[in-house]
Amino acid sequence: MDEIGELSPSSQAKLLRFLQEGEYYPLGSDKPKRLQARIVLATNQDLVASQKDGSFRSDLYYRLKTHHIHVPPLRKRKENIALLTRHFAEQAAKEYGRTPPHISSELMLMLTRYDFPGNVRELQAMITHAVSVSDKNLNRDDFDALFNFSTEEQQGLSDENALLNFFFGDGKYTIFFGYEKNHDHGSPFQNRW
């Protein structure tokens, strides 16, 4: 389960009961079933602070605390960016029926300088989109098109400002496009505006 720090108080109570008793009621049934799975939960919230301020149940917090793994955000694991970039590029290429692309060193350098406020999901979305619109190689141009950044806009900017401008433009808005496979019309993508 993801984002357990966002659970409502009633959902926290249900989760605690589920974990303690090992039983659940399938939708529409009045007969309980036994839990036959391991539960992995994740959050980016500070559960200690949430537990102390009363927005997260103490009993649930201590029930979950039995096995705790802290995974730092991607901005603190820059050494993982190259590996994840290659993995996501190969994954997207397979999904789109393409050959895994070559990733330019210039692009890799830019990615390692970016802080990824959206964490690993943001990197995955960037790479998936770039693979979907590029030919055989991933380079800066694929990301320029994604973020509507032109080299003319970069002139006169420092490297840091150019990088921020590359990823955020003028900072007024960000546009996300959703794609899905469209098997009915022979086209691999369908815009969902």
Image (cartoon, helix red, strand yellow):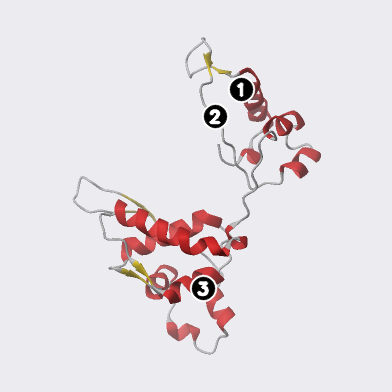
Residue 168 sits above or below residue 117 on the image = below
Q: Mark 2 points at which residue?
A: 38
Residue at the extreme right of the image, as rendered: 52
Find disc 1 in the rendering and name its residue: 18
Query: Residue 123: image x %, image y %?
Result: 48, 59
Question: What number is the disc on residue 147?
Answer: none
Residue at x 35% of width, y 57% of height: 90
The residue under the point 44% across, 73% down is 107
Residue 128 appears at what percent x and percent y?
39, 58
Q: Earlier in the sequence, mark 1 or mark 2?
A: 1
Q: How far apart are marks 3 and 2 (CA)?
A: 43 Å
Percent of width and height locating residue 120: 52, 55
Name the kind of residue labelled 2 in the image.
Arg
The first of marks 3 and 1 along the sequence is 1
Which residue, given by chain and number where applicable, does mark 3 sit on? 169
Quadrant location of the C terminus in the rendered image:
bottom left
